[in-house]
Amino acid sequence: MEDIQDYKLLTTDKAKDTKALRDILIGLSPFQIRFIEQYIRTGSAGQAARLAGSEAKNPETIGYKLLQDERIIKAIA
């Protein structure tokens, strides 16, 4: 019975949220997805860019630019 209850929970707003997030992530590069994961974890754009694999001299700039992308903003929200 627990499986049925879990399924019912997933068929409500969570399922819609999951599909919306999946649709957003499909269009992103692996680097952008790693950036999102690290930004959510750290809260720092520069650190997230560095941890996602940026080799730029100034990862803060890369992080800032990534945070200007509407798809990334939606994925983080």
Image: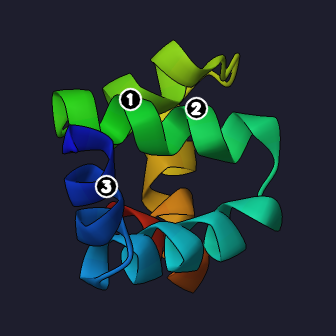
Question: Residue at label 1?
Answer: 38
Residue 70 in the image: state x and y as whole percent. Answer: 53, 84
Residue type, label 1: Gln
Question: Residue at label 3?
Answer: 4
As drawn, the label of residue 58 is: none
61, 76: nearer the viewer: 76
In the image: residue 31, left or right of residue 50: right
Q: Residue at x 33, y 39 (%)?
A: 39
**Who comes first in sequence, dot 2 or dot 3?**
3
Query: Mark 1 to mark 2: distance in Å?
Result: 6 Å
Disc 2, disc 3: CB below 8 Å?
Answer: no
Disc 1, disc 2: CB below 8 Å?
Answer: yes
Residue 41 in the image: state x and y as whole percent. Answer: 23, 29
Q: Nearer the viewer, mark 2 or mark 3?
A: 3
Query: Quarter holding the N terminus?
Result: top left
Q: Residue at x 20, y 41 (%)?
A: 2
Q: Residue at x 66, y 46 (%)?
A: 32
Residue type, label 3: Ile
Query: Quarter holding the C terminus?
Result: bottom left
In the image: residue 11, left or right of residue 27: left
Residue type, label 2: Arg
53, 7: nearer the viewer: 7
Q: Secondary structure at mark 3?
A: helix
Query: Mark 1 to mark 3: distance in Å?
Result: 34 Å
Q: Mark 3 packing: few (<14 Cα in 10 Å), some, or many (20+)?
A: few
Residue 50 in the image: state x and y as whole percent. Answer: 50, 19
In the image: residue 55, left or right of residue 27: left
**Who comes first in sequence, dot 1 or dot 3?**
3
Residue 13 visible:
yes
Vertical placement of residue 22 versus 50, above or below: below
Question: Residue at label 2?
Answer: 34
